[in-house]
């Protein structure tokens, strides 16, 4: 049994310093030690609280965000939740633009936090209606507003260079052989990659890409190209964001929703961990990286958010049947 040792002064101090758990099934499957960074223990229950805090504090330091100001962002949901809680703790308003395809739990959480929610139809990035472009327009038209711009604002990846990577390095006592995760903005993968490589160039950094994203082909063959599709929320990128620029990627894996969901299922049934699909895809990538690195190696990945955010989707048998996920696993 370990006990927390200090009182934290406020909510924002609860962001980061997340536990690292050894995952039994994935470790056995790979012959390695696979560790999951428990980002669901952040106050907004996802990895994106870290980026939200750094983006807001960067805007404050630049003078772009003044007392009583408004933070506007386009997001799959988790960044919006992080921004809304940081904004509430600091006295700002939030306007969150989100595709209407995201889970109801994320929308309800944003409304509960008092964010103004703007739902837009799912549209390709090239469309002016895409949630990112809509959020930029709203920020430009709203007096006293800043656009968080998580995809191309590198305050995002800084949160992972100085936070997540340092924590993993310390928690594993400097014995890390590999790290992998999927990409939404790329802040986590690039930030943790850069942070770990600064300690040890020999750490292998791997991209784990879902189908429907274009990065696997980019890092494998130098061409942004996608095939297939994924129902995973929060991941799947079609371009090199500013956060991804210069990311030290050594190798890459492409993981199907079925393979990711199998790990979500197993971690729930065998280890009592309730996660979302991006975490399952990350764990599948970590198992592959572990197998490639060889027996006894130590591989870390990200458990991005809580599965309680997907009770109406991934954890609902009817939804899975509609998406063909159960069939794929059976
Ligand atoms: N998983 C989930 C559930 C997310 O919401 C996100 C963020 N969009 C990610 C993974 C990917 O994180 P990043 O933006 O740092 O690439």
Image (cartoon, grey):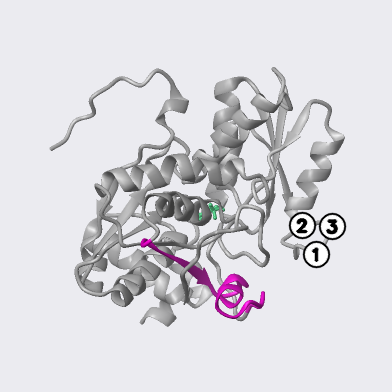
Mark 1 surroundings: few (<14), some (14-19) or many (≥20) residues within 10 A: few
Identify the residue shown where x is 43% and y is 20%. Answer: 10
- Distance between the Cα atoms at labels 3 and 2? 6 Å
Write the start and end of the magenta stretch as one range: 202-226
Residue 8 in percent (x, y) is at 36, 21
Q: Are marks 3 and 2 in contact (CB under 8 Å)?
A: yes
Residue 313 in percent (x, y) is at 50, 60
Q: Quadrant of residue 237?
A: bottom right
Q: Are marks 2 and 1 in contact (CB under 8 Å)?
A: yes
Quadrant containing the N terminus is top left
The residue identified by callout 3 is 128
Q: Is residue 312 above or below residue 93?
A: below
User: Would you say residue 260 is visible in this rendering?
Assistant: yes
Labelled disc at residue 126: 1
The residue identified by callout 2 is 130
Q: Secondary structure at mark 3?
A: loop
Quadrant containing the C terminus is bottom left
Identify the residue shown where x is 84% and y is 57%. Answer: 128
Is 212 covered by the magenta stretch?
yes
User: Does residue 228 appear left or right of residue 145 in this picture?
Assistant: left
Q: Quadrant of residue 274?
A: bottom left
Residue at the outermost left position: 1
The total number of labels drawn is 3
User: Would you say residue 112 is visible in this rendering?
Assistant: no
């Amino acid at each position: 049994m370990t006990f927390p040792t200090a009182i934290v002064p406020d909510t924002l101090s609860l962001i980061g310093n997340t536990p690292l758990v050894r995952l039994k099934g994935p470790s056995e499957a790979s012959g390695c030690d696979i560790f999951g960074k428990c980002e669901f223990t952040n106050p907004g229950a996802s990895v994106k609280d870290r980026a939200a805090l750094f983006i807001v504090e960067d805007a404050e330091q630049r003078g772009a965000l003044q007392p009583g100001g408004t933070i506007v962002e386009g997001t799959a949901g988790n960044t919006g939740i992080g921004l809304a809680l940081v904004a509430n703790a600091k006295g700002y308003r939030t306007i969150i633009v989100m595709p209407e395809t995201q889970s109801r739990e994320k929308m309800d959480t944003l409304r509960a936090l008092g964010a103004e929610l703007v739902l837009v139809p799912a549209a390709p990035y090239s469309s002016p209606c895409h949630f990112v472009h809509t959020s930029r327009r709203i920020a430009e038209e709203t007096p006293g507003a800043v656009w968080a711009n998580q995809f191309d604002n590198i305050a995002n990846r800084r949160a992972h260079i100085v936070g997540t990577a340092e924590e993993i390095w310390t928690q594993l006592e400097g014995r890390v052989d590999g790290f992998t995760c999927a990409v939404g903005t790329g802040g986590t993968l690039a930030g943790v990659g850069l942070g770990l490589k600064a300690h040890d160039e020999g750490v292998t950094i791997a991209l784990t890409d879902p189908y429907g994203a274009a990065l696997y082909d980019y890092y494998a063959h130098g061409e942004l190209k996608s095939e297939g599709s994924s129902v995973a929320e929060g991941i799947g990128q079609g371009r090199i964001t500013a956060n991804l620029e210069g990311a030290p990627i050594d190798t890459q894996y492409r993981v199907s929703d079925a393979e990711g969901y199998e790990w979500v299922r197993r971690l729930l049934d065998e280890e009592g961990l309730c996660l979302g699909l991006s975490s399952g895809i990350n764990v599948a990538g970590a198992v592959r990286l572990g197998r490639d690195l060889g027996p006894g190696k130590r591989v870390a990945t990200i458990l991005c958010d809580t599965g309680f955010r997907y009770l109406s989707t991934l954890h609902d048998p009817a939804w899975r049947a509609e998406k063909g996920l159960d069939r794929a696993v059976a």
